[in-house]
Amino acid sequence: MRAALHRVGALLALVLALVMHAPAQAHKPSDSYLTITLADDAITGRWDIALRDLDFAIGLDADGDGAITWGEVRARHVEIAAYALARLAVHVDGADGPKCTVEVGAQAIDDHTDGSYSVLPLTVRCPKLPKRLTIDYRLFADLDPQHRGLLYLQAGGVARSAVLGPQAPVQSFDLKEASRLAQFFDYLRDGVWHIWIGFDHILFLLSLLLPAVLVWGGRQWRAAETFGAAFWSVVRVVTAFTAAHSITLTLATLGYVSLPSRWVESAIAASVVLAALNNVWPVFHGRRWMVAFGFGLIHGFGFASVLVDLGLPRDALALALVGFNLGVECGQLAIVAVFLPLAFSLRRSWFYRRLVMIGGSLVIAVLAAVWLCERLFMFKVLPF
Amino acid sequence: MPFPRVALFLAPLLLAVLPAGAVPHVPSSDSVVVERLPARATDPRMRELIGLRAAWRRDPADANAAVRLAQAYFDQAAAEGDPRYIGHAQAAIGLWWERPDPPPNVRVVRAMLLQYGHRFGEAVADLDAAVAQQPGLGEAWAWLAGIHMVRADYAQARRACTALAPLAPPLIATGCMAYVDSLTGRAQPAAAALRAALQADGGAGAARRQWVLTRLAEIEEHRGAVAPAEAAYREALGLDRSDVYLLAAYADFLLDHNRAAEVLVLLKDRARADVLLLRLALAAKRAKDPAQAGWAADLAARFAAAQARGDTTHQKEEARFALAVQGQAERALALAQANYVLQREVADARILLEAALAARQPAAAAPVLQWMAASGVESVTLRALAARIGALR
């Protein structure tokens, strides 16, 4: 009974929160939102213009009661379209190139933070398929020079954005498909870069690689006999890590799974601690690839948040995903390529087996433990 | 580079602002109200604006009509905290906006609009030119004093106050000088001078008294004289409750004294103005009010919208939001540093110190510490923060 009462209390609080917070209409400078999309050789668009601005320009509030009704807006749809179109020109190539015709479809209403907007669906017909598009935007330039048109232009798998207004009324945009290859390499580079600056990923990998040139014999680490044995041990770890993080990177990027970043980042730090401690007090010596796989799943979520922050082209998602992932692998392989020969040549020395393997692992564990606390309790001690 | 990487970063930002998820709708009937305008056409203030607008329309080249209209829109923007009116004001003097040599009264209005967009250098140039041509232009001197204060140029501010003194009512003249004194090591005499002037000029208009009372409240607050500060704030609010600046200053005072619940009451209908929404969000967070998440989301959306149009005039507010609501110390510090390049008042100094502390980067606080030493500013809050920064080093 008490528990049930608590539930009701919590629910009430939630409902109150929803009721009490009527979103306040913001005071904001005047903006319009112009979206133009080139797909399958057709150009379509959408233009959201604030009713308040339209009222100031052409007067929508017919009865002057301070409230604009849908009827008052509907009665002026033709004038709204004519007023807006007279202040927008789309050209093929430069501003002196052939002009495209723009038509407005059936208008509707949408709500933005600062009030309601009339939504004008656009159909743009150009005399020829444009390689470059020029937009000449003059809306409200005479009434409110601080008005801006926020353009979002999508073509050839690339999204461009621009701020139109009296400060820059005419702007041109190259629609040539940004070469897919160049785009792919951009993501590849980002992937490589991310693994190199991601100390937590590097340290995790190193913690798993350090013992690869050694063999756990009873109570201590001994040098691996052949390069082949060490090599295959590394291959197993790297492959398992790669397979695992590829799975979660893909799932998270495509939006199938989503975890709070604070927990992901904390779990990544925890994985580094455990992997490093496993070198000092081995539990998983023979099956490190399983550790790599299990924790690799968590690291994948970390990679995904970076990729999402970079921005994803909606129609080139696979390209971005594969490029970024391959970049991460290349970055990893570069680290392995430096590590393996070095570690293999040093594996018999006391320096490697005690100082690097045990001392290094302890340092990594301590460092990662600090990260873990930082990420769990949201404070900052380390500069990286 | 085949396509600018910037676009990749900007695009998600714009996507956040764009109604990508929202589907436009068609209201169910003609009688559905889809938008409420800020005022009816019959509202006295609106009627005045409509009259001024008609006069300007008849002859847009008449500088006096244009200035009157622009001034009225500017006043409206200040009272409502609504930047759309700034754009309308700019349109009113549009004929002269790009001209190198407009008449002095147009220059003053242009400077007012420029400083609104934090273009302080250009505003000062306009005002200097205006007073050079017409030294009796009291309003220009008042704006010069204000802008120099914001930029912490106290010698220039004092010069402007001196020039203003014979042109302005005694209350304003005293207020101007006291404002400068209060930040240059003479806070106590400044407060006494303001009190004496208020007493001597009992018949001054409400707006003027309110401005002086607000100054007095701030001076007392900086000195750590809590009760006198509160009394001055309350007296100012008793005159008129619409001034956005005054409400924001009093809300900050309440927040500093752990009275977040009172802020929620004071500002509950004023969330339209960003600066007041910020105080609501801060208060809701402190009071663990259930509206907290909603206010924070609203404010984040507004900052995103401002950023999408390339507007950086919100950096001080955004820094406070990032620090106190979002817990992002480093972003807050970057914003506070960028803001401090342009604006150097006590509040600007304070957020920079707070962010530097939270981000554990004492070196970032250096410009504020230098300013504190050079100006002799008396602020208990700044001094306490500076001491903590010192301990961090």
Image (cartoon, grey):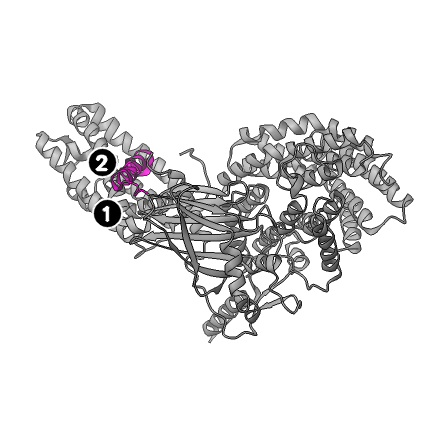
Question: Nearer the N terminus, badge 1 or badge 2?
Answer: 1
Can residue B310 be found in the magenta stretch? no
The residue lying toward the viewer, choosing from B53 and B291, is B53
Secondary structure, mark 2, is helix
Residue A110 visible from this viewpoint: yes
- Which residue, given by chain and number where applicable, does mark 2 sit on? A330
In what quadrant of the picture does the C terminus of chain A appear?
A: top left
- Which residue, given by chain and number where applicable, does mark 1 sit on? A246
Residue drawn 51% across the image and 59% down it:
A82
Q: CA distance from mark 1 to mark 2?
A: 13 Å
Can you tell which quarter of the image residue B267 is in? Answer: bottom right
Secondary structure, mark 1, is helix
Residue A267 visible from this viewpoint: no
| Residue A113 picture location, percent across and down | 53, 57
Which region shows up in magenta?
A176-203
- The type of residue carrying mark 2 is Cys
| Residue A194 picture location, percent across and down | 32, 37
